[in-house]
């Protein structure tokens, strides 16, 4: 546990000791808040439904940018060799880095607090849906992070890690995308409904409304666990 | 196996696809020895070290460090080793202090011992002036010293150093060599180099590797006698199948 925490600390420090962390956060806040504010004035209602509806897409793009450096940079710099010759088990390193990335996602989402704050000042928003929405965002961030961390472990090039991460995220998105499901339904309605359940949209569409179902949490934890496991395999396989 | 033998390598094999980087390599290192690993580039020196430190898995043969086999308990093996890879890869955005703290934590050292050992390592490696510097701002010589500090931090039985003097200027070279000799007084050191004077000056034993196999093994003077030459350069050349230089 000590090793995992040490790695978590170091990794989180690395996000904030270099420009990368700040750039990602500032960009994320700028874009999401801008989109939200324009929507707010168009829709004229004091809630975050529009925001939470778009959040999955932003996370799909931003989280791979957060995770891309976790393993790829160490490979490129050669520091992976020192890390993996310490008396540290592979899963401890994988978990430590993952948790650091997750903490970063948490901070990034937490910094959007001004949005709900302005809503509370302007009107009387539903707290439940807001909490549910943020929770869903965190859980989705966790899934994308596990995927992105796995992608990062496959290569020494951060850009490639980013692209692989986005591609896998997009694949999961497609599995819940209606036109794709309709197309599959033409061949087999059974396969279509099975595929749908793997899709991110199926589980997180309800998040936008602030409804968090335990089945969605199970889905998220399973996908996260799967990709973390694959991550450990890849790190060990290089041997 | 006597407690005397720290490293025991038996018929080690490591392949990268069709290439046999380490091809049936066997040798032993006794406690207290300072062993120089010589060989042409691509001979398998780094690969041997990566297998010993359990960074890579062997494709054949066995090896053990302090009696612990590398296939049975790699994490335990790593506890006995202080390793410095080629080019001292370090986290450039960290300060020396932070980095050594991190290394100490990863080694499972409790706070008091960590502080004590970091103080010692910083002094031993001459890093007092650079303690608060970001590693990225350090010259190669100083980075090498930070790498060495991290390797000796937990007081390991065995130090494995991959070309610790490569790329250093003459002054830095002497400093690092002095360091290795100092550490070698109480620890077992296993390092690779291309510089023959280093081996003569520092090592009491040298292993010459060529194409993944052991070409020669002995003290510098033994090697010169065995190969019938008057200096180590020629010993190296003859052992690797080349003509000795007469000039």
Image (cartoon, coloured by chain):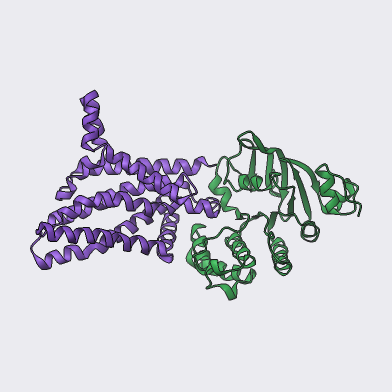
Chain colours: A purple, B green
Q: Position of residue B189 (x, y in %)?
A: 69, 56
Q: Residue furthest bottom?
A: B129
Residue beneath the point at 34% across and 54% down: A102
- At a point 17% along the width and 45% down the height, the residue shown is A206
The quadrant in which the N terminus of chain B is found is top right
Residue at 72% from the left image edge and 45% from the top image edge: B28
B92 lies above or below A136 = below
Side of A209 relative to A139 (left or right):
left
Whether residue B224 appears in this view of the structure is yes
Which percent across, then down, holds residue B125?
Answer: 64, 68
Asked if one can make out residue A188 in the rendered structure from this viewpoint, the answer is no
Q: In the rendered view of the protein, which quadrant contains the C terminus of chain B? A: bottom right
Position of A142 with respect to A49 (left or right) is right
Q: Is residue A19 left or right of residue A83?
A: left
Residue placed most toward the observer, A226 or A182: A182
The image quadrant that residue B118 belongs to is bottom right
Task: Kindly identify the residue that appears in the image at 40 percent across and 46 percent down.
Answer: A163
User: Which of the 4 image quarters holds residue A69?
Assistant: bottom left
The vertical placement of B173 against B28, above or below, is below
Residue B177, position as x, y percentages in the image: 72, 64
Question: Residue A100, image x and y in percent?
Answer: 38, 56
């Amino acid at each position: 546990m000590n090793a995992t925490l040490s790695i978590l600390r170091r990794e989180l420090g690395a996000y904030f000791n270099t420009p990368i962390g700040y750039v990602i956060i500032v960009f994320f806040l700028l874009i999401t808040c801008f989109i939200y504010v324009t929507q707010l004035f168009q829709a004229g209602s004091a809630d975050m439904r529009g925001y939470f509806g778009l959040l999955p897409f932003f996370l799909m793009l931003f989280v791979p940018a957060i995770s891309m450096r976790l393993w790829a940079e160490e490979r490129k710099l050669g520091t992976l060799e020192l890390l993996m010759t310490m008396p540290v088990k592979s899963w401890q390193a994988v978990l430590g880095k993952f948790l650091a990335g997750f903490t970063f996602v948490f901070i990034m989402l937490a910094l959007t607090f001004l949005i709900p704050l302005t809503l509370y000042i302007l009107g009387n928003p539903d707290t439940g849906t807001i909490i549910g929405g943020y929770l869903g965002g965190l859980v989705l961030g966790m899934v994308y992070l596990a995927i992105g961390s796995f992608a990062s472990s496959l290569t020494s090039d951060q850009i490639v890690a980013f692209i692989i991460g986005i591609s896998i995220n997009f694949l999961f998105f497609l599995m819940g995308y209606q036109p794709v499901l309709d197309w599959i339904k033409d061949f087999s309605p059974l396969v279509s409904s099975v595929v749908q359940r793997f899709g991110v949209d199926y589980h997180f569409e309800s998040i936008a409304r602030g409804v968090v179902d335990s089945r969605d949490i199970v889905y998220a934890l399973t996908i996260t666990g799967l990709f973390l496991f694959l991550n450990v395999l890849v790190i060990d396989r290089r041997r | 196996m006597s407690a005397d033998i720290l490293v025991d390598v038996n018929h080690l094999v490591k392949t990268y696809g069709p290439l046999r980087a380490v091809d049936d390599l066997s040798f032993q290192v006794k406690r207290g020895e300072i062993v120089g690993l010589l060989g042409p580039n691509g001979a398998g020196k780094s690969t041997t070290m990566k297998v010993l430190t359990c960074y890579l898995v062997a494709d054949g043969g066995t090896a053990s460090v302090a009696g612990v086999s590398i296939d049975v308990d790699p994490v335990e093996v790593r506890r006995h080793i202080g390793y410095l890879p080629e080019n001292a890869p370090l986290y450039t955005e960290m300060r020396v202090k932070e980095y050594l703290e991190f290394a100490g934590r990863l080694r499972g050292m409790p706070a008091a011992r960590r502080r004590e050992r970091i103080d010692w390592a910083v002094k031993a490696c001459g890093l007092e002036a650079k303690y608060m510097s970001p590693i990225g701002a350090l010259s190669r010589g100083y980075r090498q010293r930070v790498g060495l500090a991290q390797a000796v931090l937990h007081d390991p039985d065995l130090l494995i150093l991959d070309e610790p003097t490569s790329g250093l200027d003459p002054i830095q070279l002497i400093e690092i060599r002095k360091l290795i000799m100092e550490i070698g007084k109480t620890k077992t050191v296993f390092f690779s180099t291309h510089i023959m004077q280093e081996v003569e000056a520092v090592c009491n034993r040298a292993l010459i590797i060529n194409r993944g196999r052991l070409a020669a093994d002995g003290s510098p003077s033994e090697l010169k006698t065995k190969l019938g030459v008057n200096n180590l350069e020629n010993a190296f050349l003859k052992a690797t199948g080349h003509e000795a230089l007469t000039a």
